[in-house]
Each structure stands twice: as structure tokens, then as C-alpha cells.
Amino acid sequence: MTYCVGIQVEEGLVFASDTRTSASFDDVRVHTKMHVFDFPGECSFVLMSAGNLGTTQAVVSRLQRDLDDGAAVSLRTFRHLFEAAEYVGRALVAAQAQVSVAAQQNGVSVESTLILGGQIAGESPGLFLIYPLGNCIAASPETPYLQIGESKYGKPILDRIIRNDTTLEDASRCALVSLDSTIRSNVSVGLPIDLALLRAGELKLGERMRLDADTPLYQEIHENWSLKLEAAVRSLPHFPWERAAGLPDTPPAQAQRPATPNEEAMANQAAQQQQ
């Protein structure tokens, strides 16, 4: 299984994906699901995938081959992003059709679902969800994010936080928490996480990074999010029977669990900075 999320806000686009995958008998454990086609000053695209790994690789190879061969139709020839999404949808359908008969006889699904995001010079950034049938839908200010794969665990924070005016950095943090929540609840989604940002108007991919279990930024987000959630639950109003017992509405801070070694190190560092 997999999980990928794309977020569209006024400042640009955020892409985040896990890297755990299983490729049938090949048993591929880790493989990137984020593919970049970058032409600075002209256009920039990011493609994320969920589903059959062979199908995804066939689509990516087709897109790259058209670019390398200078084909009459390629990612560089479109004036509008929705036309590029339709082109990728046709490539997806063709890739599935090549192996569908043999796969059906062996009970193997060759379907893939894609997220295509990017910007073409002269228009705003955009984000599209491309279905196995080749049709697609676009993100909008009312629906500013798209998910593929194991989406349910990482959806709540996106629904609560992401709006059109959310900053690109806050959207990126939400994407990482969304991935972290999914990884915690579903063993089929796993580290490392690929993260990329495309700022509106820059026409090239901006910040890009891979976060693993030992990446300090990921460790801090993972641990701080858990602590903040625990504190939020403890701060919720008490039940009537708790109030009748004379318990305060806000439990004392001492009731929280002991700090982890990493939390203690962070606290010591903060204290040293204040001295």
C-alpha cells in the first residue's frame, strides 16, 4: 500500500509521499513514488503514484521518452495544466492496457492512481487526481488537497487545518503530520517520506527533502505532535461525575507522562539559550 498527499494553497503546492511498496514477487520494499519533471522558467511538474509499481514505471518512462525524443506531444508542449493531466491519463490507460489481459488471468491488479501537480508559465499552479480510467479531477479552494492510497488516517488534520490561505510551510507541516499519523496506524505505509514544495510563480521545484526515522526534523514533529495531542485531550472539559468529585477542569501539568530523553535534551537546550 502507499499514501501520497498533494496540497494546493495560495502560495503554491506541497507534495508528500511515503516510500514503502510491495511489487508482487519482486518484493521491492522501498521505492520513490514522487517523480519530478522540472523545466525552470517554463514549467514544472510533480507526479505521485499509488498502485501497481510496474504500471507507474511504464507511465513515467513514457513521459520521459516523449520529452527526450522531442515528441510533438509531451509535458513541455501544453499551455494549460488540465491538458497535461489528460495526456498523463492517456499514458496511464495505455500502460494498463499493455499488461491487463495477462494480469487478469493471474489475478493481479495493474491499476494505478496518480496525482499530478505543477505550474505552466502564464497560469496558476494546479493539482489533479488522475484515476485508472484516465479521467481526472482538480483541487480547488473548497477542496485544497488530494490524496491517494491509504488516505483515511491522515485526513483529519487536513480537514481541520488546510485552507486556501494556509501558508506553504504550515501546509508542509500538516502534510508531514498526515503521513506520520498514517505510518503510525498502518504498517503498509512507511518511512522515509519524500517532501517537495513548488512556490507559485517560481516555475521550478523549490525545497525538496527526504525524512527518515533518524532525521531530526521528523523526530521533533513526530514527538511534539504526540505531546500536544495528549495535552489537548487532558485539557478538554471534565465529565459531570469528575466535576462532582471535585476535580479541576484543567488537570495539572504534573499529570503528563515523563519526558523522553530527546524531550529532556530539547528542554535543556532551550534553557541554555535563555541563560
Image (tube, rainbow, N blue to C red):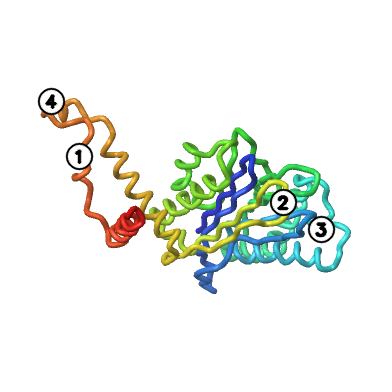
Q: Mark 4: give few (<14), some (14-19) or many (20+) Cα within 10 Å.
A: few
x then y, percent, for residue 91: 74, 57
The outermost residue toward the front is 275
Counting residues from the start of the chain, the first of labels 2 and 1 encountered is 2
Q: How many marks?
A: 4
**Residue at 39% from the left image edge and 55% from the top image edge:** 222
| The C terminus lies in quadrant | bottom left
Disc on res. 74: 3
**How far is mark 3 from mark 4, CA to CA?**
70 Å
Tell me which label, 2 or 4, sits earlier in the chain: 2
Which dot marks residue 202?
Answer: 2
- Which badge, 3 or 4, is on the more N-terminal residue? 3
Which residue is under mark 4?
244
Tell which circle, 3 or 2, labels the residue nearer the N-terminal end.
3
Q: Residue at 81% of width from left, 58% of height from top?
A: 74
Q: Nearer the viewer, mark 3 or mark 2?
A: 2
Quickly name the residue at label 1: 252
Q: Report the amino acid beneath label 2.
A: Glu
Q: Secondary structure at mark 3?
A: loop
User: Disc 1 on helix, strand or loop?
Assistant: loop
Q: Residue 184, image x and y in percent?
A: 39, 55
In the image, residue 52 above or below residue 152: below
The three-letter amino acid code for the residue at tag 4 is Ala
Q: Quadrant of residue 228?
A: top left
Q: Are marks 3 and 4 in contact (CB under 8 Å)?
A: no
